[in-house]
Amino acid sequence: MQQKERNVTQLKISQRRRALKSSAATLALAMMAVPAFAQTATAETPAAAEEDATIVVTGSLIKNPNLVSSSPVTVTTAETIQLRGSNVAEEVLREIPGIVPNIGSSVNNGNGGASFVDLRGLGSNRNLVLLDGQRIAPAGLGGVVDLNNIPLALVERVDALTGAAVTTYGADAITGVVNFVTRKNFTGVDMQVSSTLNEQGDGFRFRTDLTIGGDFADGKGNAVVSLGYQKADPVFQGNRDISINGISSFTGNAGAGSPTSVPARLFGMRPLDANGRPVTDPTVANIGNTQVAPDGSRAIPFYQDFNFNPFNIFQTPFERFNMFAKANYEITDNIEVYGRGMFSKNTVRTIIAPSGLFAQTVNIPLSNPFMNANIRNQYCGFNTTPGGVNGVPTYTPRFTQAECDRAATATSPTDPNYRTVRVPVSRRTVEAGTRDSEYTTTLFDYTAGFRGKLTNTVDWDVSASYGQSENIERATGYLITDRVQEALLATNPNTCLSGNALCVPLNVFGPAGSITPAMARFISADSTTRRTTSLTQVRGLLSGDLGVGIGDAEPIGFAVGAEYRDYAAAVLPDDFSERGALGGGGGPTPRVEGGYEVREVYGEVIAPLLQGKPFFENLTLEAGARYSDYKVRAAGNPSFDAFTWKVGGNWEVTKGFKIRGNYSKAVRAPNIGELFSPVSRGLTNLGTDPCAGSAPVNNANLRAVCIAQGAPANLIGFIEQPAAGQANAYGGGNPNVQPEKATTWTIGTVIQPAFAPGLAITLDYYNIGVTDAITSPLPGDSIAACFANLTAASAASAACRAIQRNPDTGSFDGESNGLPRPLSNLGRLKTDGLDFNVSYSTDLGFAKLGVNGNVNYTFRSLFQATPTDINRECVGYFSPNCSFTGSIQPKWQSSLRTTLSFDLVDVSVLWRHIDSVIQEPLNAAPLAQGGDAAPFFAPFRRIRAYDYFDLTGRFNISDNLTLLMTVNNLFDTKPPLVGNAAGATAFNSGNTFPSTYDALGRRYTVQVNVRF
């Protein structure tokens, strides 16, 4: 490989290995910056050195070789990425201390075909992802960049910065930025091939990249193109011992799956006597939750959940083709034209258990050909007055036995004896196969611009860019609910009452296999949803220094500029998805189209105040401000503006000891989803329903509330807990939301003692607070708002009546709206913590030793959706409510890489530590305290501390050929067992948290790198 600074220089093997060694000289630049955040390069890592040795620091628009921002970055180098053997950027970032795992390759149910990063656990929509300091087209309505599209092969380093980034990069960078910096002026050929296989023989991954670059026009120009292909196979949960069976988080028992099972789960049934007739004794209760008996003879009390685990996956299948190219050409000595283009087409596939009727309320004729006499009698005999009349036990059947018998032979709706029952049915259609969603994302993003020198000390840069992302979801294996209803309206096994020649009568009362292929074909259909986003940008920047300084200090640096951005996004579902007709689809997919534009002006200044004085080796002050004007393309043309600013400083007391800090006022503008999404029904997570079971039977206030929310009085005492820990919820966007406001500040120190050459230490405190946060209540908030302090007046309260139950089951299933989750500007978020980094290198004589460690300690991470909701603490805890932005956020998290470099071989060990966590105390607390009153099974209430070790050997076979072999999870450490209701479905899967803990097991990677 060859790398061009100003002149082409051949890199030697020893130079390539420096990324595994510690160099205090260059770490001074990389670490004199922000809180130590990433696995910092243990190497000579030039911070975007340009041909005039000008340094560009992520977090500032000012370029100056002698000025370093008070909010600098730590660096994850290309070498670190290579050592991890990762296919996509999300897998690299997920394991960095201080980053909370978000949607990625370990998320199955809940993955929309994209991967995101969440700095500090406040949400992926509160940090920016940049490519070479510029925004690229986002994915979806949330305006968040899909990490699957980042071209890792050409990435030179990844800069992560916490806070103080809004004035530099604009709104959204509340918690910071992740900037992927690509190699500059690359010449030569670089080819990489790698493959990974789990020890259990599954999850094969393959990656190959080819990068070609060179100079042209006598060195005035340079062009580079990088092509890549990546592929990953699925890892099914049925192939791991921990996840073969669903396990209850509350009892620890196996068999805890979904009540949408096979044989079917039936509602509205009556027990039968010895003669197969309904029991008429009014003191005998109905059967609230039944299932067709194994022999198919009748409905009996529910006995068998459906084990969905084996169908689900720990690693989502992934395939990507990508191309990245950029070029620059010096038109004159002072003017350069440049451009960059990126194309990516990736496909992510999620696989979940078969579809079915999920408590779908249907009309079934009593003459349905697949309904036997016993089940018909149980439907007919259902007591419609289980509470009696005027306090007197009374038996009032749905239909008398005579009516029932006559209806059994009525084959036409015109027959006066024809009767139907309107009842919920849950039946897993295993005959139709799994529910697969294939998300194919095609992205292109290109930039063109001119830059040059206005004077010897002032540069200018004008550019424009456009990017577009299209995500097409193709869902297969789903039932179409209205076709199911049509197929149930049948009185013979061959034709449907609708007269539709294509309709095949459906048997929901039989065992697995009773739904024939013809039946399955009629009730199933593919569904497609298209999601598009686009981003147009125009930017002008003037930067440099004023040529004068304060006293004898360096000149004052400055940057001023203006920027225009136009965002547009749309979700275009087909009819099936838009109507919510997909069985097990989670609800309707609303049609959304919207956009907004923003015009901004901004400026920054860095002023050295004192240099080379006693106790003031260097004292520098910096400041910045940005004004933003937003216009939303909606009715009434709403608009809003925002002003952000920052101040910061560096005080190098003496050589080797520095104090730094910054303070900023930031904003986050509402994204298109938050502005334009209509209110619709979806799924959330809820472990315990206060109305379920016997609780409301003898509690008058609770009973009244449950009935006011839509539960039938005759089902009180028979309401079931949320199926598989999932409940319906409704919410959407709000065109009236305004920008969030945030205050962020950091203070820290950098120590590089002269008595310990090669040692560099940083310690930084960060504090991020968000007010007027755009948030929705968590499920626990909605439950607590109604049920925490019940009185006789609660049934009429707005908080209780906003909860809407299924009128046929009393639960949060079927087509009920469920729990309210309105969007507002009433939220508050708060987090603070410490980042510690230590890096050391030395020559041991027989080898070079390099050590780099990163530690994050988070004091708190608070979320409050509205002033009346719970101010919830989630650091060090896990629960469904504590999964509102991502997976688990431990208090302590660390990584330590130790490398021994010999002449031709490098050996590197990475040790990652995750602190112990416990069940969120509120989650197990009584309702009066805002809890769910449901502690987990005792062994599941705590997850012990975890340690993972990865071993890498790198063999420098020649100047052009390198071989790497990596063993991830060296000791095959098993993930924790917590059951299937310990967190949100996206992150608590397979009885564990696979985004936080390694569920794949030991795996082996071989990489070959060839350079010319």
Image (tube, helix red, strand yellow):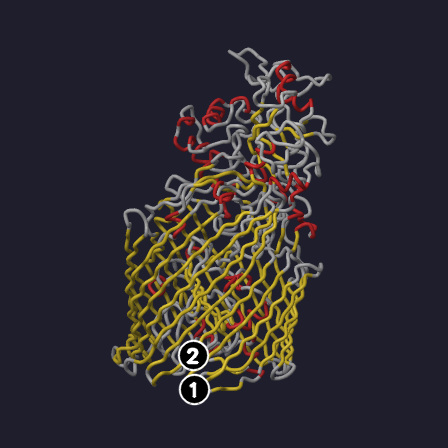
Could you tell me which residue is drawn at 65 percent across and 22 percent down? 376
Report the side of 895 relative to 659 (left or right). Answer: right
Query: In the picture, which quadrant includes the C terminus?
Result: bottom right
Left or right, 519 with reference to 344: right
- What is the x, y in percent for residue 677? 41, 46
Q: Residues within 10 Å of mark 1 (few under 14, many from 20)?
A: few
Q: Counting residues from the N terminus, which is met first, the one under dot 2 or under dot 1? A: 2
Q: Are marks 2 and 1 in contact (CB under 8 Å)?
A: no
Q: Amino acid at mark 2?
A: Ala
Asked if residue 458 can be seen in this view, the reply is: yes
Other-residue count near label 2 (Cα within 10 Å), few / some / many at <14 / 14–19 / ≥20: some
Which residue is tagged 1?
217
Q: Within the image, what quadrant is residue 843 found in?
A: bottom right
Res 910 → quadrant: bottom right
Residue at image position (66%, 42%) is: 430
> Quick one: SS at disc 2?
loop
Mark-to-mark CA distance, 2 and 1: 22 Å
Comparing 244 with 859, the one in front is 244
Rendered position, 310 above or below 232: above
| Residue 314 percent across, percent down from the top left | 62, 53
Q: Is residue 833 above or below residue 426?
A: below
Q: Which mark is residue 49?
A: 2
Residue 153 or 417: which is nearer the viewer?
417
Name the residue type under label 1: Ala
- Answer yes or no: is residue 285 visible: no
Q: Is residue 231 above or below residue 752?
A: above
Quadrant of the snapshot with the N terminus: bottom right
Q: Give how far across and how far down residue 274 sits, in percent.
A: 73, 17
Residue at the bottom extreme?
218
Q: Residue drawn 64% across and 17% down?
A: 406
Query: Which percent across, then down, holds residue 606?
Result: 31, 72
